[in-house]
Image (spheres, rainbow, N blue to C red):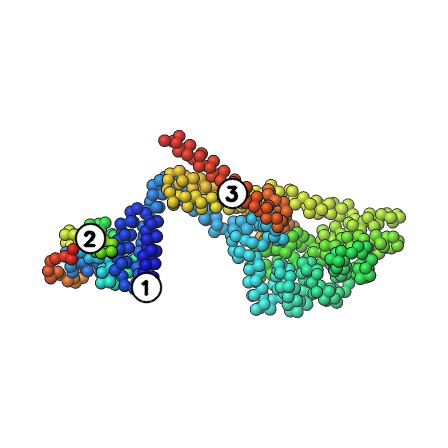
Amino acid sequence: MSTQTLRVLQEFVAQPKTWRYGYDLSRDTELKAGTLYPILMRLCECGILESKWSEPEGSAPPRHMYRLTAPGLRAVKEALRERGIAFREPLASGGRA
Amino acid sequence: MKNAAIAFVKIVLAISSADSQDWGRAMLAEMHHLNGAWESWRWAVGCSAILLRRTMISKLSQIWHASERANAVALVCLGLAGLLLLVPTFRQGMNVALSCWQIVSNSRQPNYRIFGNTWIQDELNSVIHDAETEHDAKTLAFAAERYPDASTAARLADEAVALDPSLTWIYTVVANNQWRSGNVPRWIDQLRRWAPDNALPDLMAAEVVDIRHAISGKDWQFSDSDWRQAMAGAFHSSKFDDYAAQQLALDREVASKRGLSDPLLFAQGYADGLYEGRLPSNASADVRLYARMLATQGKYEEIDRFGQLLRAPGQTDETMVIGAGLGDAMVGKNPETPFLTPAQQIRIRERLSRMHSEGSANRPRVRAIQISGLLFLTFTLALIFSLGRVFVRPSALAVRLAAVLSASLLASAASLYLSYRPYAVLFNHFLQSGDWSPIREFLIFSSLRPPFGPRVGTDDIRMYAWTAVITICSGALLWIVGSNALRRMNAARQ
């Protein structure tokens, strides 16, 4: 697992039930689109992340959102612990969408 | 700027594969929430790279699954052809094979190459740069012999002679490409001072007069006193040296020192007759006419004496040919004496035959090389089109056609390599041993007309237009026939 992938997963683990947008993730992880999206694609393909389209807001087109699946969350926590990587446990449940 | 970045991603998305569309729209949607043009463009470039990469992988996968066996054949053939491209002899063969076609494009000398420095002039410039830095007179003389631009060739020759006066003979070579130049009379004076007993500078002086009258268009009947004086000087000389031996020694020395081994570079500047004596083009006519003038005055001894110079051991074939012209002037002499020995007469006949037959003995092999080179280029172009078709619309048929073209490409490359290799061996032998006779092949090669198409260089645009039409139609016909054949094979198999 690459450093960039771990950084993305840490972001998701911190807010596991929150749907996240690509641009927000890019800003929070400081990863460029060219690095972030291939990671998101792989994580979605192997079932760690789930995705859905948001409802359109005004003239802007619907956005793609991502969050950890339940099995994905367990697997990621385990992987992070195995590597001795500290991660922030969620304070409260809930989601943006 | 932001809208331009969005439009750019939309275009990339439009040409992306179906399985990239969802992700493409996801990345595009985020762009509406970015701030600033710079950030938008960074995002756009990143997204486009991902989309294009995914599309490429998707296409390659489709192509591979369209016909795995055809793909394997194409890859093996292209790999082998690629390996051949790494062989220097093959690249050299390709350059030489295509040199004949440049004659059609109105080029006096083939000077364009596919591999290496594209223009031979570029390679000469590089050699000249080194030689000038190192004050290397011989390399400057080597470049002067070949440089296509007359004023540069003159400058190089002057530099070489200034550094090493024993190279003064180089003026006899350089003058051959620029008789109208104001430098020539100065060179002739220098040559006369450097080698006062040689007849060649006088023949050069006669040539200058010939050219002057040819330009004026007046019928001068060789009555010009300058011409008569020059010819008298030539006939009274005690030596005839065309400096072919010096030229050969110089070229070999420079080739060895600078690591030059391209036959096209050596042949550059020499339509034919490399190391066969570069005499003024009117020398033969001048000598014959002056000999007839002497014969009418009964001065056979002068003719005979000059003839002895021309047939002295070690003279080149070119000089022998000129000498043969003197035989006519001796006809009136009583008793007549054979001007040339039978062996010399045979040598001259062979030389004349070679000049007019364009190397008929070697023509089949030369043709094989020329046609292989042309086919190699044709198959390469056809394969590029074919691969484009495969990428745009992958299908088993398109992939099989590409495989057939790849195999044809490999066959033409192998044919070119095998037919050219003996020439490369001969040329390397010449560089090592100094035996130049086999490299006549190369000169015949570069001046041999193409096997079909126009026979002479022309500026007539209609010729090129028709050649293009015929080539395109032939290509289209080949494509249709090939496609139909493959389609039938495909149908029969199913």
User: What residue is disc 1 on?
Assistant: B38
- Looking at the image, residue B381 lies above or below residue B159: above
Q: Is residue A86 left or right of residue B228?
A: left
Quadrant holding the N terminus of chain B:
bottom left
Tag 3 residue:
B472
Position of B331 with respect to B344 (left or right) is right
Total tally of numbered discs in the picture: 3
Residue nearer the viewer, B37 or A1? B37
Q: How far apart are marks 1 and 2 (CA)?
A: 28 Å
Residue bearing the label numbered 2: A55
Q: Against B6, is B402 above or below? A: above
The quadrant in which residue B144 appears is bottom right
Whole-angstrom CA distance, mark 1 to mark 3, is: 46 Å
Judging from the image, what secondary structure is the residue with disc 1 in?
helix
Check the residue under mark 3 and report the chain it is in: B
Sequence order check, earlier mark of 1 and 3: 1
Q: Say which of B200 and B378 sits in front.
A: B378
Q: Is mark 2 on a helix, strand or loop?
A: loop
- Callouts 2 and 3 in the same chain: no
**CA distance for labels 2 and 3:** 55 Å
Q: Which residue is drawn at 24% across and 56% down?
A: A60
User: Which amino acid is tagged 1?
Assistant: Trp
Q: Where is residue B67 in the image (x, y as percent from the top left)?
A: 36, 39
Q: Are marks 1 and 3 in contact (CB under 8 Å)?
A: no
Identify which amino acid the numbered label 2 is placed on: Glu
Which is nearer the eye, B338 or A47?
Answer: A47
Q: Residue B244 carries which label?
A: none
Q: Share a chain, discs 1 and 2?
A: no
Disc nearest the viewer among 1 and 2: 2
Q: Is residue B473 above or below residue B95?
A: above
